[in-house]
Image: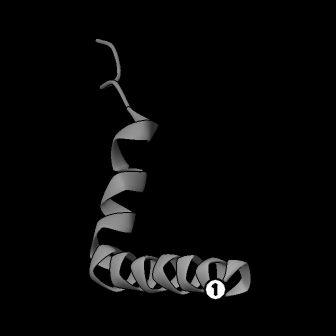
Amino acid sequence: MSAPAHHPDAAQPDAVEAVVPLIPMVLPLAGAVLIFLLAFIAVSMA
């Protein structure tokens, strides 16, 4: 009889599933930085 097949990659965490809990914090922060940079560019050009 053969030994049962062992899949070492089946237990590794998914990269997308590791990032999903951070989205509610990162998305507004990225938006705030983008708005700040756009306002800074607008003021510097005025």
Residue 16 place in picture, x, y as percent: 35, 54
Looking at this rendering, what residue extends furthest in the right direction? 44
In percent of width and height, residue 33 lies at 53, 83
Q: Is residue 14 visible?
A: no
- Compared with residue 41, is residue 6 higher up or lower down, i.e. above or below? above
Q: Is residue 1 left or right of residue 45?
A: left
Residue 5 appears in which quarter of the rendering?
Answer: top left
Residue 2 placement (x, y as % from top left): 33, 14
- Nearer to me, 42 or 12: 42
Q: What SS does tag 1 mark? A: helix
Quarter of the image with the N terminus in it: top left
Type of the residue with mark 1: Phe
Check disc 1: other Cα within 10 Å, few if <14, some if 14-19, many if 20+. Answer: few
* Viewer-nearest residue: 2 or 34: 34
Q: Quadrant of residue 46?
A: bottom right
At horizontal 47% and vertical 81% (from top left) the residue drawn is 35
- Which one is nearer the viewer's eye here, 10 or 43? 43
Which residue is located at x 60 percent, y 79 percent? 42
Residue 28 seen by the camera: yes
Task: Give the residue number, with chain letter if any, for mark 1.
Answer: 40
Tell me where residue 29 appears, x and y as whole percent: 43, 85
Q: Identify the residue shown where x is 38% and y is 65%.
A: 18
Compared with residue 39, is residue 8 higher up or lower down, i.e. above or below?
above
